[in-house]
Image (spheres, rainbow, N blue to C red):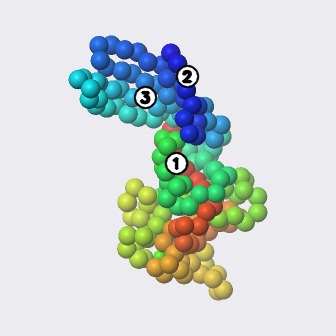
């Protein structure tokens, strides 16, 4: 048993050695974490190692908002779209992907309760690959949309300049914006 620290969270590693197969259990004690641990089974032989198993298990959704088998969790850190995606994956999740009205409404309500006032918050949706074709981060097509509709500023309106999608924290409406913009973000985890 030993303890070390990596760049964004503390990790405990229990190492159980059987021949040359290693079992690593990383308990994530990051205060921003949804409450997960990562398990790796590694087989090493003659200086080369192969991963047999590498998965995250989410234990609870105490800090976030649970709907069905998803746990949404909001992060108060400014990141651009790519970095937000990376941060969600490092924690064992992915960017939030509201797939239908029920998930959208639950997410909008949660975001409103977390971020008081009007803040843009990243969702895992973009049309970077092909203008006007909105895909979730996992490359599946978006079929339910919640674009802001207003006579002064209906969305999306950014064309090829704005290819990533943010949710507004006050009403849950979606806006297209430029992907390099840094803002709060939402991850989702399987529970
Ligand atoms: Ca666009």
| Rendered location of residue 3, percent (x, y) | 55, 22
Q: Which mark is residue 52?
A: none
Q: Is residue 24 left or right of residue 117?
A: left
Q: Nearer the viewer, residue 99 or 29?
A: 29
| Rendered location of residue 144, percent (x, y) | 48, 66
Point 49% across, 28% down: residue: 26
Task: Give the number of callouts.
Answer: 3
- The mark closer to the camera, 2 or 1, is 2
Looking at the image, the residue that sits furthest to the left is 46
Point 59% across, 67% down: residue: 181
Pointer 2 residue: 3
Q: Nearer the viewer, residue 48 or 30?
A: 48
As drawn, 50 above or below 117: above
Q: Nearer the viewer, residue 116 or 181?
A: 181
Pointer 1 residue: 88
Query: How far apart in space, not on screen, are marks 2 and 1 (Cα)?
Result: 23 Å
Point 23% across, 23% down: residue: 46
Pointer 3 residue: 39
- The mark closer to the camera, 3 or 2, is 2
* Dot 3 or dot 1, earlier in sequence: 3
Label 2 element class: strand
């Amino acid at each position: 048993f030993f303890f070390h620290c990596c760049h964004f969270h503390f990790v405990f590693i229990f190492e159980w050695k059987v021949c040359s197969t290693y079992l690593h259990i990383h308990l994530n004690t990051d205060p921003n974490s949804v409450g997960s641990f990562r398990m790796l089974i590694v087989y090493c032989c003659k200086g080369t190692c192969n991963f047999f198993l590498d998965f995250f298990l989410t234990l609870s959704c105490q800090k976030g908002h649970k709907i069905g088998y998803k746990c949404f969790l909001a992060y108060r850190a400014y990141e651009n779209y790519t970095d937000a995606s990376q941060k969600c994956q490092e924690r064992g999740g992915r960017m939030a992907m509201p797939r239908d009205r029920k998930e959208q409404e639950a997410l909008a309500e949660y975001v409103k309760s977390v971020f008081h006032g009007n803040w843009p918050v990243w969702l895992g949706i973009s049309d970077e690959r092909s203008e006007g074709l909105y895909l979730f981060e996992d490359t599946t097509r978006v079929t339910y949309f919640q674009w802001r509709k207003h006579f002064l500023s209906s969305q999306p309106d950014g064309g090829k300049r704005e290819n990533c999608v943010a949710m507004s924290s006050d009403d849950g409406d979606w806006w297209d914006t430029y992907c390099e913009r840094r803002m709060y973000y939402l991850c989702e985890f399987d529970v």
